[in-house]
């Protein structure tokens, strides 16, 4: 990964906002800028270089992973190490302004930060500066994401092998997660959703101990983390004898999913993609049952920008990676959701998820 | 769980701090106070009742889980729903002060909160008020924790069945996590550590694709979540022909672990428990290789108060649940850690982890 380039782009943004340095505290942003994947660390991006602060637990890991930043390890919390670094640095020159990530620093951390800052250095709220960079994935990132999506997709094949009436939802999830681990995933990108029967109408129905009942949908929403990047996919399977209504709703959701995917290309707004899905479901008389937005960005985090939702003005650009996941939910009865990941290309989009979307009954 | 009692205790604390209400934004605290386990929600604890705010995705779940609070569901973010609630509430009476959790609200969230507050209501930093309650586990919590620890301990038996020279660390983790799912765990309480060879000297060596080499320790540090409560356990196993030094270090770590456990009783400080472990390792000439603290509290979160570390003045009380986990690490060579969970009782402590600590070579 070209961490140097990413940091340089960030320096431009920080400079334009009249900041002398930016303190990056959000760990996915730290990861993006210097490669560190541990769970405690701060990156200070200064005009002429960067410094990474962490505690002794991450000594070996930091030296293995962190690129394009000087590494400072200590027995104290990273915020205090930062304060010491700045105290040594500042000697009588003009006053400095350090931006911090307002979305990712707590009130208490801000207080501690202020306490550790030497005189002549001021901390200032900064708007999100790393996230706009992360919005556009470069070729190396796209390659990582393709691998994560491919690995993730294999879990659905495994689910189909074990999904049947009477099997506990968690046992399906267990088989998928076991396969993920055995095939190299670092972890799951979110708690696996295997939602059967009435639970399929819950947009966030984590796998429970309930057995899969006959005559209903099972929503399978799952993802892996591979090389730091997340995958996200949903398929919905019918169990038992098929009803006409189930088939009709499934087909409408599939049509909405395809229509939204068709709409994805540079220059289109996120809201227009959402509308493409919503229009199809509206014509099928199902608009009111599509209760969430059409999708979201995916990358180092499972949910990132852009939001693919009604009215969103964000204009799609090549390199964005998003989900397209319309759903229809009849509370107390069942629900259907179909989700792919797609990458915006110069001319349209690349559907990353390889799994078919045909109606499957087991 | 007696949510009403917990909220009443919190009301006392909030009242003593001259707050008219406390806004609870940290999700484990929300869970503790009203039972909600979803990933978005706010609880406002007022003098005469509580109100829980979440968005429509959690409608069903909130109504199933939330106790002793009125539920407000909307299409807007919870902070905005809170603002609406307060605007309706406040009509010309005296001005109100709402405390918020300074450790758990970001600068940006605070700004949004302030924007949504009607005039006459002021937001104020509050010290941690829920965490001190969570520090002492009640009988129902202790029962949950015992179950989680028991389930977690079975994973080590599984690890022993598969751990041998040449097996990938992740494959050991995969078998353990598969068993966790199949036996009812909601998830793992942290990324499973299976660290073999030189990696055993990393205190945070997540399972990698590396095969387990002959002639070294394998540190297995793992935990499950069951009924919302975390387990945490470490055992270290030798692989191949045993060296005298390995045996000597293992025995010293075990002795340190037992000495610290012996020290646990009401009235003793967390620092004294840490010192008990450190003294044993000091006498064995290993003090400098024990690079972390002796333990931490465990409950709804994997790391919570108290810290069992050098100089900590916190006095142990019945109902606290902590880990005792000394370790010795030779960088570039190998490491050993042994960890149990213990509950402080009126007369001493109850070792929750049932697994033996004898030296095992596979």
Image (cartoon, coloured by chain):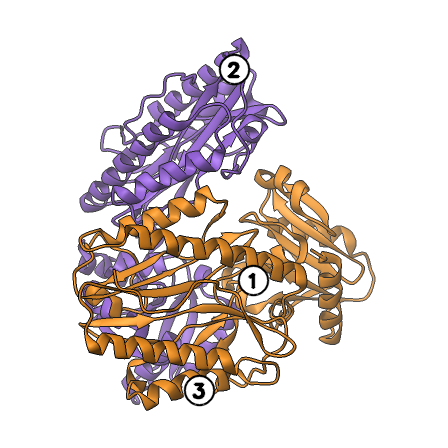
Chain colours: A orange, B purple
Rendered-image quadrant of the C terminus of chain A: bottom left
- Residue at x 60% of width, y 50% of height: A41
Q: Disc 2 designates what residue?
A: B246
Tell me, yes or no, if residue A26 can be seen here. no
First in residue order: circle 1 vs circle 3: 1
Displayed quadrant of residue A196? bottom left
Q: Nearer the viewer, mark 1 or mark 2?
A: 2
Q: Is residue B271 left or right of residue A110?
A: left
Q: Categorize mark 1 by other alpha carbons within 10 Å: few (<14), some (14-19), many (20+).
A: many
**Residue A110 tag number:** 1
- Of residues B166 and A255, the one nearer the viewer is A255
- Of residues B53 and B270, the one nearer the viewer is B53
On screen, B90 above or below B59? below
Q: Disc 3 designates what residue?
A: A275
Q: Are marks 2 and 3 in contact (CB under 8 Å)?
A: no
Element type at marker 3? Answer: helix
Q: Are marks 1 and 2 in contact (CB under 8 Å)?
A: no
- Of residues A325 and A247, the one nearer the viewer is A247
- Residue at x 56% of width, y 29% of height: B201
Element type at marker 1? Answer: helix
């Amino acid at each position: 990964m070209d961490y140097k380039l990413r940091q340089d782009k960030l320096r431009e943004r920080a400079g334009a906002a009249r900041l002398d340095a930016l303190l990056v505290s959000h760990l996915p942003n730290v990861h993006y800028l210097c490669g560190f994947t541990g769970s405690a660390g701060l990156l200070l991006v200064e005009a002429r270089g960067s410094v990474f602060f962490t505690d002794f637990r991450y000594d070996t890991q930091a030296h293995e992973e962190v690129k394009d930043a000087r590494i400072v390890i200590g027995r104290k919390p990273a915020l205090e190490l930062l304060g010491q670094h700045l105290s040594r640095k500042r000697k009588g020159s003009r006053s400095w302004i350090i931006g911090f990530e307002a979305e990712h620093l707590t009130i208490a951390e801000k207080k501690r930060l202020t306490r550790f800052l030497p005189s002549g250095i001021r901390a200032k709220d900064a708007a999100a500066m790393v996230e706009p960079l992360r919005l556009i994935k470069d070729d190396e990132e796209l390659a990582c994401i393709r691998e994560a999506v491919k690995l993730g997709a294999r879990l659905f094949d495994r689910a189909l092998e074990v999904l049947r009436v009477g099997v506990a939802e968690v046992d399906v999830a267990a088989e998928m997660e076991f396969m993920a681990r055995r095939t190299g995933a670092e972890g799951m990108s979110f708690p696996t959703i295997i939602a059967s029967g009435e639970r399929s109408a819950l947009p966030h129905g984590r796998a429970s101990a309930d057995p899969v009942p006959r005559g209903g949908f099972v929503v399978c929403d799952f993802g892996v983390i591979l090389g730091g990047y997340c995958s996200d996919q949903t398929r919905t399977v019918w169990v038992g004898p098929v009803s006409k209504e189930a088939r009709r709703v499934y087909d409408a959701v599939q049509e909405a999913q395809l229509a939204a995917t068709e709409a994805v290309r540079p220059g289109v707004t996120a809201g227009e993609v959402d509308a493409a899905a919503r229009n199809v479901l509206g014509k099928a008389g199902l608009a009111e049952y599509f209760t969430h937005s059409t999708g979201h960005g995916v990358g180092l985090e499972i949910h990132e920008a852009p939001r693919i939702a009604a009215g969103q003005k964000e204009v799609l650009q090549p390199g964005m990676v998003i989900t397209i996941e319309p759903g229809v939910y009849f509370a107390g009865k069942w629900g259907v959701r179909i989700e792919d990941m797609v990458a915006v290309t110069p001319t349209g989009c690349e559907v990353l998820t390889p799994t078919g979307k045909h109606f499957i009954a087991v």
